[in-house]
Image (cartoon, rainbow, N blue to C red):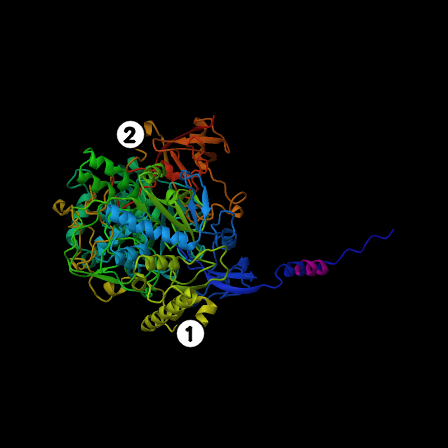
């Protein structure tokens, strides 16, 4: 019998192609930007849509279509102009899966009467009922308990702040959990508020073209994006291929250490400043620092104070490499060798990740790295860096107000991640068990008399822009809040971008303490897209549109080394009754009697039309600003179609900040006009207890009224509950809560495509620590300390130091009947009431044992 004819390779290929094409029949292709708090948010997504639903998400192809490795076809000028595809990260391809997840909130709901918070028992209500209920509760709570009875958790909500300001009641916390130590350091060292960090940044093309060495200090660019997808890591890879040495200093042997670095220097977590001081010690003693730069651009009085400290002339402790080795576990010869190499490789691009600041005493780490770069002359030069915040060349902000700027300054009585302590410790104050001064120190009190004249909209640190926040506010200089305590009875959602943050998971404080604080709150409102832990503990939940796929928006990311704007046209229909978050604020404003003041575009009808009118006006305003910067903006119609403005396209040279200071002689805004390594304000104990302003009348970014034992310069102070703390006898492993590769904080936790083969949520343990406990890879283990208990599998590895453990940030809180967290958010283990509050403490000590 003759066998059947086997189709040719060409025929089989044609069959497969035909079958794949049929899957996309009837689709249209569109572009959208990405809007999420990842540290990048400059990606462009190519979206396939059918019948109002997104069927697939593909890489950007604005440039180099059909090219795999783009640097093979790009010139240096192309790299300077950022003519690369703005590809998304793994989460970028999953937005449509997230938007259609079973946990998606489709309708306004309220907690069933008699049900306990956290049980997840809700009933559907109409939008009118939900908004009437929320606005009615706001009025009732304020009438009963006063104007300081409505509060927000982490993170500060700029839109609610504006609503509170116009209405005359409500208060907020200050600060975020990401870069605040660096923002404080920038203001103290340069006189610029932290949100002006673009002035000191160097873009990616600059280090690729001009640096002699790259140092990644606690920095993992293959996870922490700082630009489209992994584009920063891509530039570092290209730099290394050019022969530029790359050094990684980290307690973990990260993917960046493995793939991008020539040398990995493991270091005990929380001890980075000891090594920084020892490096400075070598540079000063061996006369390797840039003396000419220091004499010209660094305040010499401040340098002398830091030099004296580094050499131990006042405290008798010479900060030598041998001294540092006993603290940070990096061999003295390695520190000395690194310092000498660092001195030879001029300029060096040194960047420290936010993670090493997000520890007790993180203010020191931020200033330490910046001080090293200053004495080596790496500020404001091509190929150097100011390692306080990574950004791009200057570009105008998108900040057109859509209503009135409030006359009332909303008080910020607490550090936002301390909101639960603000609630809980009031009982101790009222019972006489805690002094009022100590209460204010612990929660980060930051209110007082305001200066006359305009005050920055970032006056209290940490409120982001967008949505008509406005640029400044007038105050008569008589506002006082010192004698008024908060009276928290209603909690409204904190946010980065409109949708509520998953506070129980993402706030840098104990989850269990937050739950205890909720018990003292009469009414809780949450707004967002997913029925996660924070939503389950609300009384009313408001469904919002997905900010990337369903909402139209002009996006300008405040992170990364590339200067882009993207447009989000709302490529998918919203499921159920999900609404634009700006509509929710506008409707609440109408019910509070301030609708026209809050949003002059919207009168209660035709939301889509009014929002489009606002966006067009906002773009017109942006276009004028771009023209002043020498950038020709596309038409509104073209921008909406292409979804991208590449600002770098207008320039032929890489960008580095502080050029006007170094090359143009323009003084900084500090008292000396130079880089200040020593803060006279922080060094003056008599200044504690009030709001603090710089020499230009600006409130100092992220400095509380009482900074506790924060030093006036970068110094080593043992961190609270670090590896040398007395509590290691009870809890011998130092827990790090690093960012995951397959989540943005806790977002995408509930997308199966980003688990399984991609990711398993486990506690990372060193082989020696696991063997001592009889634990094998994959074993279910019990993790605990005095704040919480969790149970997840162990990942046994040699990729981190002994005595160190890692649980990736953002796992959803899923307690069982005994209160054991089976989802394991590492936040259940967090606590710190002893350190200065600017740096959020996201580490702690734990014990691990094999689960019974």
Q: Residue furthest right?
A: 1
Image coordinates of residue 762 in percent, x first then y, are: 46, 37
- Residue under label 1, please give it: 635
Spatial separation of the CA atoms under disc 1 and disc 2: 63 Å
Other residues around mark 2 within 10 Å, as few (<14) / some (14–19) / many (≥20): few
| Left or right: 479 as drawn, with respect to 516 | left
Count the marks: how many? 2
Residue pointed to by mark 2: 726
Q: Are marks 1 and 2 in contact (CB under 8 Å)?
A: no
Is label 1 in a helix, a strand or a loop? loop
* Magenta span includes 91: no
Q: Secondary structure at mark 2?
A: helix
Q: Nearer the viewer, mark 1 or mark 2?
A: 1
**Nearest to N terminus: mark 1 or mark 2:** 1
Give residue 188's position: percent from left, percent from top. 21, 53
Which portion, as a residue range, is magenta?
10-17
């Amino acid at each position: 019998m003759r066998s059947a004819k086997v189709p040719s390779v060409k025929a089989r290929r044609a069959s497969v192609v035909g079958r794949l094409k049929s899957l996309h029949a009837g689709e249209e292709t569109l572009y959208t930007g990405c809007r999420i708090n990842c540290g990048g948010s400059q990606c462009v997504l190519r979206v396939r849509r059918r019948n109002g639903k997104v069927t697939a998400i593909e890489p950007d192809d604005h440039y180099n279509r059909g090219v795999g490795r783009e640097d093979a076809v790009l010139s240096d000028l192309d790299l300077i102009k950022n003519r690369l595809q703005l590809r998304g990260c793994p989460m970028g391809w999953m937005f449509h899966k997230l938007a259609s997840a079973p946990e998606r909130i489709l309708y306004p709901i309220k907690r069933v009467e008699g049900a306990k918070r956290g049980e997840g028992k809700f009933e559907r209500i109409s939008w009118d009922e939900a908004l009437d209920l929320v606005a009615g509760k706001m009025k009732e709570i304020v009438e009963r308990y006063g104007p300081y009875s409505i509060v927000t958790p982490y993170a500060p909500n700029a839109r609610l702040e504006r609503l509170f300001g116009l209405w005359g009641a409500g208060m907020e916390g200050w600060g975020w959990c990401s870069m605040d130590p660096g923002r404080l350091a920038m203001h103290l060292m340069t006189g610029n508020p932290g949100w002006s960090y673009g002035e000191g940044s160097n873009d990616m093309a600059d280090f690729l073209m001009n640096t002699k060495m790259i140092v990644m200090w606690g920095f993992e660019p293959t996870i922490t994006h700082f630009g489209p997808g992994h584009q920063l890591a891509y530039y570092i890879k290209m730099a290394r291929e050019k022969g530029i040495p790359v050094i990684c200093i980290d307690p973990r042997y990260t993917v960046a250490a493995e793939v991008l670095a020539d040398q990995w220097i493991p270091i005990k977590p929380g001890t980075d400043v000891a090594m920084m001081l020892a490096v400075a010690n070598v540079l000063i003693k061996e006369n390797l620092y840039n003396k000419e730069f220091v004499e010209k651009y660094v305040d010499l009085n401040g340098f002398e104070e830091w030099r004296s400290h580094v050499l131990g002339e006042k405290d008798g402790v010479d900060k030598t490499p041998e001294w540092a080795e006993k603290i940070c576990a990096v061999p003295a010869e390695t520190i000395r060798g690194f310092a000498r190499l660092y001195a030879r490789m001029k300029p060096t691009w040194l960047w420290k990740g936010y993670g090493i600041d997000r520890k007790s005493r993180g203010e020191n780490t931020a200033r330490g790295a910046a001080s090293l770069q200053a004495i080596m002359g790496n500020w404001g030069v091509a190929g150097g860096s100011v390692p306080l915040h990574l950004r791009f060349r200057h570009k105008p902000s998108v900040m057109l107000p859509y209503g009135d700027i409030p006359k009332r300054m909303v008080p910020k009585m607490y550090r936002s991640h301390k909101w639960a302590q603000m609630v809980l410790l009031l009982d101790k104050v009222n019972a006489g068990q805690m002094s009022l001064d100590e209460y204010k120190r612990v929660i980060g009190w930051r209110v007082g008399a305001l200066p006359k004249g305009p005050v920055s909209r970032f006056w209290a640190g940490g409120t982001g822009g967008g949505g008509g926040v406005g640029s400044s506010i007038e105050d008569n200089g008589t506002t006082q809040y010192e004698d008024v305590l908060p009276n928290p009875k209603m909690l409204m959602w904190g946010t980065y971008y409109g949708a509520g943050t998953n506070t129980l998971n993402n706030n840098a404080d104990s989850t269990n303490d937050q739950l205890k604080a909720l018990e003292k709150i009469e009414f809780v409102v949450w707004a967002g897209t997913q029925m996660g832990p924070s939503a389950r503990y609300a009384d009313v939940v408001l469904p919002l549109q997905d900010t990337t796929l369903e909402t139209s928006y002009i996006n300008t990311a405040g992170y990364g080394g590339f200067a882009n704007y993207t447009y989000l046209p709302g490529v998918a229909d919203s499921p159920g009754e999900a609404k634009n978050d700006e509509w929710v604020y506008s409707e609440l404003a109408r019910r509070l009697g301030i609708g026209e003041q809050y949003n002059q575009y919207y009168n209660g009808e035709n939301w889509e039309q009014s929002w489009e009118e606002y966006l067009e006006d906002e773009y017109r305003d942006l276009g004028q600003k771009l023209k002043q910067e020498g950038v020709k903006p596309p038409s509104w119609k073209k921008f909406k179609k292409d979804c991208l403005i590449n600002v770098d396209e207008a320039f032929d040279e890489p960008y580095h900040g502080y050029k006007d200071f170094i090359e143009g002689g323009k003084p900084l805004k500090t008292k000396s006009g130079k880089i200040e390594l020593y803060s006279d304000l922080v060094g003056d104990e008599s200044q504690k207890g009030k709001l603090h302003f710089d020499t230009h009348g600006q409130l100092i970014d992220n400095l509380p009224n009482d900074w506790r034992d924060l030093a006036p310069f970068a110094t080593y102070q043992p961190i609270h509950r670090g590896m040398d703390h007395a509590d290691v006898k009870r809890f011998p492993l130092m827990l790090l809560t690093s960012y995951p590769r397959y989540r943005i904080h806790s977002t995408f936790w509930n997308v199966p495509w980003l688990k399984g083969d991609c990711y398993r949520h486990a506690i990372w343990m060193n082989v020696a620590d696991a063997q001592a406990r009889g634990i094998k890879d994959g074993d279910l283990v019990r993790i605990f300390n005095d704040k919480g208990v969790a149970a997840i599998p162990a990942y046994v590895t040699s990729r981190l130091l002994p005595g160190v453990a890692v649980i990736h940030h953002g796992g959803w809180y899923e307690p069982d009947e005994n209160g054991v967290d089976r989802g394991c958010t590492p936040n259940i283990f967090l606590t710190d009431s002893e350190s200065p509050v600017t740096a959020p403490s996201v580490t702690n000590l734990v014990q691990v044992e094999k689960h019974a």
